[in-house]
Image (cartoon, rainbow, N blue to C red):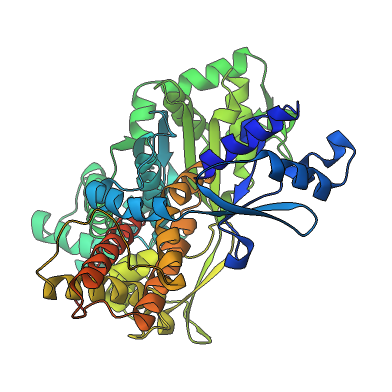
Amino acid sequence: MKERLKNIISKALEKQDIKKDIDEIVIEIPKERDNGDYSSNIAMQLTKELHRNPREIAEELKEKINDEQIVKIEVAGPGFLNFFVKKDYLFENIKTILNQKENYGKSNIGNKEKLNIEFVSANPTGILHLGHARGASYGDSLARILEFAGYDVTREYYINDAGNQIHNLELSIIGRYEEVCGRPSTLPKEGYHGKEIIDIAKELKETYGENGIDSSIVKQKGLDYLLGQIKKDLTNFRVSFDIWSSEKSIYEKGLVDNVKEELQKKGYTYEENGALWLKTSMFGDEKDRVIVKADGSNTYLLPDIAYHKDKYSRGYDKLIDVFGADHHGYIARLKGALAMLGENPEKLDIAILQMVRLVRGKEEIKMSKRTGNAVTINELVDEVGLNGVRYFFLARSIDTQMDFDLELATKQSNENPVYYIEYAHARICSILEEYKEKEEIEHFETITSSYAIELLSKMYEFKNIVEIAARKRVPHMITNYVYDLATLFHTFYAHEKVLTEDKKYTNERIHLIEAVGIVIRNALALIGVEARNKM
């Protein structure tokens, strides 16, 4: 309908010899139904160009528009064109939803554009915690939405399995191994203290005894154990990856040395105090950065540049990285380095996740009761439930800090938005289970209330919401949408009976609520939430 109205307005403009790109014609759905089904500000857009009062422009356009689908047009406020349209398309959409089922809302706006999304990419030195959960929720949901909108999406996890943090992991495990063997030991200053390090040490003792272990065995055991736990936790969190890239393999392929040599040849490096510096300040960074330290070891920036250079070489149309809040300053230096290597830095988009504060009511929770460390994904899921965790992390835009309220997330009441949505779907399933006499419908005749029309209109919006969420990369739009849809369903159900003695009346509403159930399921699937059939 939006596209139809754009074309109608475009033709009306042509009649007045006014040229306007059809994509610049804005059609919106008014918040207040009294302002029509759709609204356009085209008259205000034309004011400067035509040097005329927008209401006059709107009145003239109104007279030029004649379409069988439009019941009436009103000029409102400073010059809005408000359209009241026939509702046939809303009833036809019920049939569309019931036919398309899990495919309803799909789009081809992506045109199979190849996207790579790298997210989570936590160092394999511990268990995934609260901050990783937000990144996992965002990255996975974004990938689902983009695929649904017609993009060709690759999900990637970058394993930091080389460098100083892995050396510290090895020393931490050795320290704990010595302890479990009953010998005095000290952990490195920047070591890892999680319970999982002790568990690894105990397994090493059981396998290899107490007489010492080769350091390469310790390192591999630590990586295998922790990466295995990360993969398991992500699978349980309904997150999967197509590619697991390794920092170690980037070194083994010679990509790090190649990049360093190319940067040197192009004159983007210099030596100072024994270190090799990169001229990132030339590309918007606040200062130049060291890529090779005075002791000959690389900083984490150099292999990261090589890794992204490798991603560029794989033929993606766009790269998306999801970074934590502490990486905001990293954007300019990484994009600058890619520009130095002759790559288009605009091809890389970096989304920054803001911090999460875990609270119970007004009390902040900083540490896990079980381990004394940051609260893990598993602990959060155990307390809240997977649906709740996935939903709450996507309820807010990632560029805003958020409070994750355990008290609210665990409430079994309508105050909890997840419970409220799940209850709507379960109620629909219960009614459909009870009614066994559904028949095909040619024309809908009894559905006329404003509650039903608002519900139908909201379902009709779904494809458009998916497209906006995909283009702007904002999964929280889907979260907000499905909550609004559930609210409209509950309101409809409170005002209208579904099961009655009137067979036609009942049959039409059975079709309606079955369609609502499908849209709720499809929306929830895009944010990694499974709709419940029973409560």
> Residue 204 or 147: which is nearer the viewer?
147
**Vertical comparison of 231 with 300: above or below:** below
Where's the C terminus, which quadrant?
bottom left
Q: Position of residue 502 (x, y in %)?
A: 21, 76
Q: Is residue 506 left or right of residue 25?
A: left
> Residue 460 or 416: which is nearer the viewer?
460
* Residue drawn where x is 53% and y is 87% of the image: 362
* Residue drawn where x is 69% and y is 27% of the image: 14
Q: Visible in this render: residue 131?
A: no
Name of the residue lying farthest toward the right? 51
Q: Visible in this render: residue 271?
A: yes
Q: Is residue 526 left or right of residue 306?
A: left
Name of the residue lying farthest toward the top? 265
Q: Position of residue 163 (x, y in %)?
A: 42, 41
> Residue 498 or 334: which is nearer the viewer?
498
**Vertical comparison of 178 with 351: above or below:** below
* Residue drawn where x is 29% and y is 80% of the image: 497
Q: Position of residue 491 (x, y in %)?
A: 41, 78
Q: Picture quarter containing residue 382?
A: bottom left
Q: How many marks?
A: 0
Q: Position of residue 185 (x, y in %)?
A: 33, 65
> Residue 68 or 350: which is nearer the viewer?
68
* Residue drawn where x is 70% and y is 34% of the image: 288
**Vertical comparison of 380 with 152: above or below:** below
